[in-house]
Image (cartoon, rainbow, N blue to C red):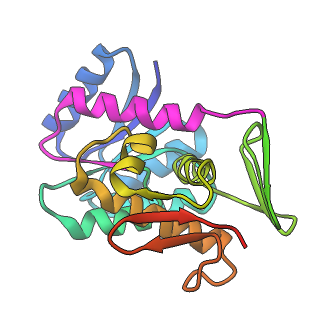
Amino acid sequence: MAGILLVEDDPSVRTALELALTRQGHSVTSYATGEEALDHIRARRPEIAILDVMLPGIDGVEVCRRVRKLDQLPVILLTARGDDLDVVVGLEAGADDYVVKPVEPRVLDARIRAVLRRAESAASDRITFGDLVIDRGALKVTLAGKEIHLTPTELRLLLELVRHPGQVLNRRYLLRAVWDHTHIADSRLVDACVQRIRAKIEPKPAEPVFIHTVRGFGYRFSPP
């Protein structure tokens, strides 16, 4: 059972999802606005937040962006079908995953559980690549002695890449290994997450020295 914060301004959708997720064994607190969501997170941090992109006032993307400045709380966005811009902007803001409306409750439940598994998974070993140190037991990444704050999904993707140093991992493989997805159309999840990791660990993100793009294939972790 997970403590879920659900933010959806459509009353019928919000009620239906709250009932469906409760039947799946989750504890759900729901709101209609981003302002209420931020107040709730500050007062009582949930285990995961599910945010509709189109909210009155502070929208879901902005809520995600504000949360990411202070917290690694897992976030799933609900987005309108075919609205690629919302998806890209949301992923760049730090969302861990997205689900397209109309929402199938069983799909949403599966995505929630997958994101939470990523947040909870950790091993007890420590990996060092020059100045980059990854402590999977402590869920801590440092670069030249400075701690780097990664979301659970960013950490899971980085760990998957460093497990195969020098090997090219295609987007389909990474989707399955990190997000539990199999639909190649979701490959933008991989690209956006790689961009966020690079912004945090690469001295010059535009000239990466750790995570390299292999055009037409995927990504390779090749530390200097």
Q: Residue at x 34, y 35 (%)?
A: 111
- Tell me the quadrant of the picture where the C terminus can be found: bottom right
Magenta stretch encompasses residue 111: yes
- 173 or 23: nearer the viewer: 173
For residue 205, above or below residue 83: below
- The percent coordinates of residue 50 (x first, y second) are 36, 42
Magenta stretch encompasses residue 13: no
For residue 3, above or below residue 54: above
Residue 70 lies in what quarter of the image?
A: bottom right
Q: Residue at x 31, y 28 (%)?
A: 109
- 152 or 168: nearer the viewer: 168
Residue interval drawn in magenta? 97-124
- The percent coordinates of residue 146 (x first, y second) are 83, 66
Q: Residue at x 58, y 52 (%)?
A: 151
- 112 or 214: nearer the viewer: 214
For residue 115, above or below residue 145: above
Say if residue 58 shows up in the picture: no
